[in-house]
Image: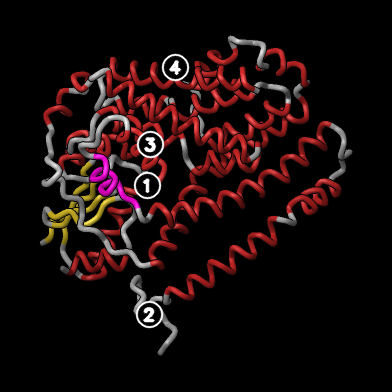
Amino acid sequence: MTLETHGVSDPHPRPDWVWHITVLALVACWYLVYVQLVPVSEWIVSLLPVDRHSHTGEALAFFFYDVPKVMMLLTLIVFAMGVVRSYFSPEKTRALLSGKRVGIGNAMAAGLGVLTPFCSCSAVPLFIGFVSAGVPLGVTFSFLIAAPMVNEVALVLLIGLVGWQVAVTYLVFGLGIAIVAGFVIGKLQLEGWLQDWVREIHIGIDDATGPQDEALSMTDRYRLGVEAVREIFAKVWIWIIAGIAMGALIHGYVPEDLMVRIMGADAWWSVPAAVVMGIPMYTNAAGVIPIVEALLGKGAALGTVLAFMMSVIALSLPEMIILRQVLTLRLIAVFIGVVATGILMVGFLFNLLF
Amino acid sequence: MKSIKVYGPGCKRCETTATLVRDAARSLGLEVEVEKVTDPRAIAMAGVMSTPGISIDGKLVHSGGLPDAQKLEGWLKA
């Protein structure tokens, strides 16, 4: 056996057990590095010519600790999600959802929205693929709301920067909004508000042949995990650094009482204001959550901050523009209205409870 | 000559997929015609739900994500 490789195809693919062991070893290394992050970041800041307890020192310590922490959490969880998602596909999800009753269908769609690989660039073909094969419109919306809103990048950043309690809250209420909003849109019976050409397409589920199932080995699934990490990093690293830098500035410099006044629980108007501000903001979870964390630290109310975050992530202008190809403006307005109402209710509820 | 279609709205992954297909065909010495389909309606009609998708002589062989190099060769040879 020679060691030279022959072009693209590898004649001796490594067996699965090599991958299992490599993955285990890497996770162990990951853990060892992760527990060292606090001392290392403090050490780096101590080398810099700033006072640790000054505004600048606070901001720098925040930055040097949070950037590597978030990057490491992201690598681990995105890899795991990449492997999990390899067991799902839009075709399988469609088969599971087609003809499902409203209600149970909405709940399944929201759950599958989290697990099915989805990129907003294929939102239109996916939408048509679902609706034309008999997935009810409201159920399709539950999927389309949950898929971007409850994503692993948002959850990682929440766990890493704000705490797992808020992450779980976000997960539960994000799914809740997707289920209820889809349910409401379904009840409104707005099928007539799709673009005409979309209504004309009717692919029966039998003719809706996707590619024949490509059999995946465990090695393929690990590869997909690695691919997911590479792709997410290429997309979000700059947002994370910008977001954390922004958060660090807020940490170091914004006076505490300012945020209590404008984003505190007593300012009722702050929830709708946060939702409205969130819609046109073009960023993703990676950019907004570090800022959210800093705002919380300065006395902003949890409900207001959750509402802002959900609005930024779930109601994004670019996605509306993509969906405009299949939905009439009226239907987009209903979609925004229903989702925004859900977010408002979550915001008020949290400000009331906490 | 095989007629190959790459389905995708024009995102970066779709471009990469088209390049991968051309490269694989060239390395196999196959003559192919690669067409990029960007119209969302045409993409949906072809049964592609997640892009990029690839069809060879009218048969959909792949959708969602970059194709695996080894599998791509297999489809081209078939």
Label 3 or label 1, whichever comes before in sequence order: 3
Same subunit under labels 3 and 4?
A: yes
Q: Residue at x 63, y 25 (%)?
A: A302
Find the distance from the CA under tag 4 to the CA under tag 2.
56 Å
Q: Which residue carries the number 3 mark?
A: A110
- Residue on which the image places disc 2: A12
Return the disc, 2 or 1, that comes first in the chain's sequence.
2
Q: Is residue B7 shown left or right of residue A256? A: left
- Distance Cα–Cα, label 2 vs label 1: 29 Å
CA gap, disc 3 and disc 4 = 18 Å
User: Which range of residues does the magenta coloring cover?
Assistant: A88-97
Q: Nearer the viewer, mark 2 or mark 1?
A: 1
Classify mark 4: helix, strand or loop: helix
Residue behind mark 1? A117
Name the dominant secondary structure of the magenta segment: helix
**Residue that mark 4 sits on:** A341
Where residue A260 appears, x then y in whole percent?
72, 17
The answer to whether residue A347 is above or below residue A37 is above
Where residue A224 sits: x, y (%)?
Answer: 41, 58
Q: Are marks 3 and 2 on the same chain?
A: yes
Between discs 4 and 2, the one toward the N terminus = 2
CA gap, disc 3 to disc 1? 13 Å
Report which quarter residue A83 is drawn in.
bottom left
Q: How many marks?
A: 4
Q: Which callout, 1 or 4, points to the residue nearer the camera?
A: 4
